[in-house]
Image (cartoon, helix red, strand yellow):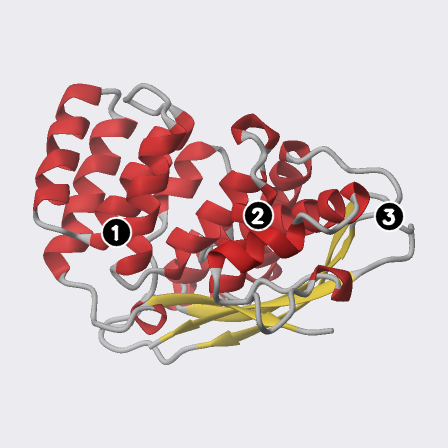
Amino acid sequence: MTAPCRALQTAGVGLLALLLSLPCAAATPKPTPLLNATAVNDVRIWIEDGNCGNAVDRLKTGLKKGYPEVALLAGSMYEHGLCVKRDWEKAVTFYAQAFEGGLVEGAERLAAGYADPVNGPDIAAAMWWGRKVRISSFNICNISQKSADDPDLFVAELATWPQQRLETCNYAVGVLAMMSAEVTYPRLGLAHQVGGNVSLSFFPGVPRIDVGKVESHEYAVYGLVDGDSLGDRRTRKVSDAFRKMVGEVAERTLRRYPQPAGIPADAVLERTYLFWME
């Protein structure tokens, strides 16, 4: 059985959409147990049905079993106040548990959340968690090697930076972390067993995110296959599903973070998202 995967390669959704995706096995040190995925799916179904009581009960059961994907889902629910009272500190706890359980998405959402003015922002925490998953941005945002792995030295070094530099780096890390966390495998691509690569260019001084070239590729389909469905996988609609999904995440991301002043209009950060099945 193939598993959908999404990865970010560095070069140079309403809320429910955020909750619909499960991390791929390739992004975790250990295979994801089937029961883990089932627990997340159960919570999601109850949320979609509007039954918060059952959703929270199923969430608690999954958390007791130590499922990292359930912890990631719990973090999202507490961060956004979905079926529970919004509580960023509780969200932090669950995101950290997810990261400790092997899910890079936990650190991505911590970096994105700490960079958000709604939660502070806490620039040092945003950059610290961004480094955990190698979310690189401008050269001016690089920390010295001696401070890189020591929280106290890390904070002390940032305290010497001018405010504009801090705000620029917080903005870049927040945008890139949220993009990385929320870009998911499009359902149309999964349905037709199609993968793809999507490039984007982030212009923080504008601000604008351009979704560039999409390269799609087909996976072998086994068993009984509907001829019309097989033909559909070669249509523009399927390949454009990747571009549409990345573009929608980009729009939400730019709305979330206020642009700081002083960033050159020609500054650009390039990224490529890879979607594959294994």
Could you tell me how far apart the alpha carbons at marks 3 and 2 are, in whole angstroms? 20 Å
Does residue 85 sit above or below 211 in this rendering? Answer: above
Question: Looking at the image, is mark 1 or mark 2 earlier in the sequence?
Answer: 1
Q: Which of the 4 image quarters holds residue 29? A: bottom left
Crowding near pointer 3: few (<14 within 10 Å), some, many (20+)?
Answer: some
Q: In which quadrant will I find the N terminus?
A: bottom left
Residue carrying label 3: 263
Residue 232 visible somewhere in the drawing: no
Residue 237 image offset from top left, x and y in percent: 58, 56
Query: In the rendered structure, which amino acid carries the disc numbered 2?
Result: Ala
The tag on residue 69 is 1
The tag earlier along the polypeptide, 3 or 2, is: 2
Q: Which residue is mark 2?
A: 124
Q: Which one is in front, 47 or 215?
A: 47
- Structural crowding at the residue carrying mark 1, measured as other residues with C-alpha within 10 Å and reported as few (<14), some (14–19) or many (≥20): many
Q: Nearer the viewer, residue 124 or 222?
A: 124
**Image coords of residue 141 (percent x, y):** 71, 60
